Image (cartoon, rainbow, N blue to C red):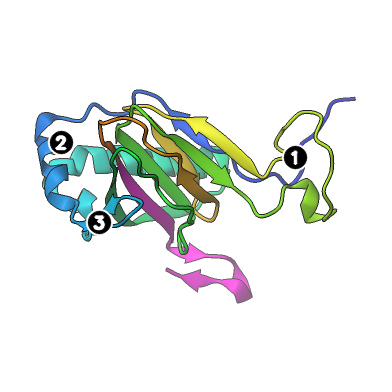
Amino acid sequence: MPKIDIFATPPLEIVPLFHNTSEEQFSKISEYVTDTSKSNSISTNIDVLSDPIFSNLKSKMYEAASNYVKNTLMIDDEIKYTNSWIALSKKGQNHHNHNHPGALVSVVFYVYCISGNLILTKERSGLQEGFNFSYNVKKYNEYNSRMWTISTKTGDLAIFPGWIAHESSENLLDDDRVVIGANYFLTGNIGESLDEVKL
């Protein structure tokens, strides 16, 4: 009898070699990163993809997010771009654990990434949602794990649900790790009858 996954968390998808960043785009990125902290630097502008120099990247990221909604989540609603930003991690820095409130889908494009992984976390594993005890793990899988570590590299695009907590591991090299992130939410008439909302 085949095993059937039930009520699963939507998956993370990685699209390799998604986009080749031009020299002009690289140059523009350095102008946006001004807000610094101990962990990393994030652009104060949260609409960086609206800069004309990123217009092709914005279109490609929207298309990837829309395909994820249509073909992975299998829902027929349209989505709307809501915001975007640039994050930069120098040697010894990492991106803190967080999620994206108000986002159905989050997309991260790895402009330059030689060191540092994407880490997704949950407070409880899928198993602990109904059985909140510790257990001895024979082999980690999607049912008993609270953390997934994904290797990422320059040119990759990561797509995942915005409510999933995520972070990056420490950048161990002298080269800065640079990403552009964007969020998307549903738009139009959402729901039916008494739960209908117009967004």
Q: Which residues lie in the magenta part?
A: 179-199
Q: Nearer the viewer, residue 107 or 169?
A: 169
Q: Earlier in the sequence, mark 3 or mark 2?
A: 2
Determine crowd level at label 2: few under 14, some 14-19, many 20+ residues with C-alpha closer than 10 A.
few
Callout 3 amino acid: Thr
**Residue 36 numbered mark, or none:** 3
Residue identifier under label 1: 143
Q: Is residue 166 left or right of residue 42?
A: right
Indicate the secondary structure of the residue bearing disc 2. Answer: helix
Measured as percent of width and height from the top left, residue 65 is found at 42, 43
Residue at position x 43%, y 37% in the image: 158
Q: Nearer the viewer, residue 64 or 135?
A: 135
* Residues at marks 3 and 2, CA–CA distance in whole angstroms: 19 Å
Determine crowd level at label 1: few under 14, some 14-19, many 20+ residues with C-alpha closer than 10 A.
few
In magenta stretch: residue 184: yes
Quadrant of res 188: bottom left
Determine crowd level at label 3: few under 14, some 14-19, many 20+ residues with C-alpha closer than 10 A.
some
Residue identifier under label 2: 26
Callout 2 amino acid: Phe
Residue at position x 22%, y 49% in the image: 49
Residue at position x 32%, y 30% in the image: 173
Measured as percent of width and height from the top left, residue 149 is found at 55, 35
Indicate the secondary structure of the residue bearing disc 1. Answer: loop
